[in-house]
Image: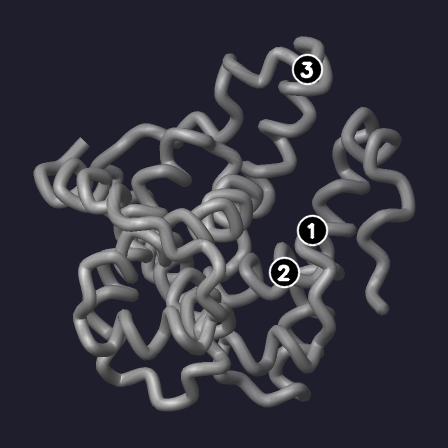
Amino acid sequence: MSMRSRALLSLVVGRDQKDASDADLARSLIAGEGWAIGETWHRFAPMVLTTAERAVGSKTEAEDLAQEVFYRVFRAAPSLRETDSLRSFIYSIAVRTLRSHFRRRQVRAWLSLSRPETLVEPGHSTLDVESRELLRKFYVLLDRLSPRDRIVFMLRRVEGMTVEEIATVMHLSVSTVKRSMQHASSRLSRWIDNDRSLAELLDGRFTVT
């Protein structure tokens, strides 16, 4: 873990302000009050960690991404104008961080600077060996999508967000989100159909709607 990550984790302790509203928390964060940094982490880190792990398929990688997300959140906090929208502000930064992450990973793959990453960790003991292998195959297919298509797909199919919500957090038009979703779904459906075992496991889950 980087020095920045260790420093960030050390900030999660502070005076108890669990009853503060998101708006109050946002105002204190903008003002640079120390307790707000720790409370922001405690309140929103589970959301960011869950989203990141579902997107990348790795708990360890998700933890590193969460550190980067909150580093960006704390730096960008003074730009927050609507204090009632702290949650969506953080979620938007998380989505932008994921897009940057997938772009970097694509560049590494194109330059052949690294071997394909393990997207499903052995620690997922609730899955049997066959299920882990199928899940690994699915994440390999996701890696073939563009960063935007992958994130749109994950937010829609895994996070259950509406098209309008995705458009808001990704700063895209609704029509662009719909096109991206259709493109991702059609490509995944075609690739999955070519793998019988994966097609049987995921039967009917990724039709375009």
Report helix, strand or loop for mark 3: loop
C-beta proximity under 8 Å, tags 3 and 1: no
Circle 3 packing at 10 Å, graded few (<14), some (14-19), many (20+), is: few
Distance between the Cα atoms at labels 2 and 1?
6 Å
Q: Which residue is mark 2?
A: 155
C-beta proximity under 8 Å, tags 2 and 1: yes
**Residue 52 visible in the shown view:** yes
Residue 98 in percent (x, y) is at 41, 57
Q: Which residue is mark 3?
A: 126
- Would you place residue 12 above or below residue 31 in this image? above
Q: Which quadrant holds residue 185?
A: bottom right
Distance between the Cα atoms at labels 2 and 3?
23 Å
Residue kind at label 1, given as amino acid type: Val
Distance between the Cα atoms at labels 3 and 1?
19 Å
Q: Residue furthest left?
A: 3
Residue 7 in percent (x, y) is at 13, 42
- The disc, 3 or 1, on the residue closer to the chain's N-terminal end is 3
Query: For residue 22, which numbered disc appears in the image?
Result: none
Query: For residue 158, which numbered disc appears in the image?
Result: 1
Residue at the image point whose x is 46% and y is 53% from the top? 43
Left or right: where 116 falls relative to 185? left
Query: Is residue 110 or residue 23 the one in the foreground?
Result: 23
Quadrant in which the N terminus is drawn: top left
Circle 2 packing at 10 Å, graded few (<14), some (14-19), many (20+), is: many
Residue kind at label 3, given as amino acid type: Thr
Query: Is residue 209 or residue 199 the one in the foreground?
Result: 209
- Would you place residue 144 above or below residue 166 in this image? above
Left or right: where 87 falls relative to 104? right
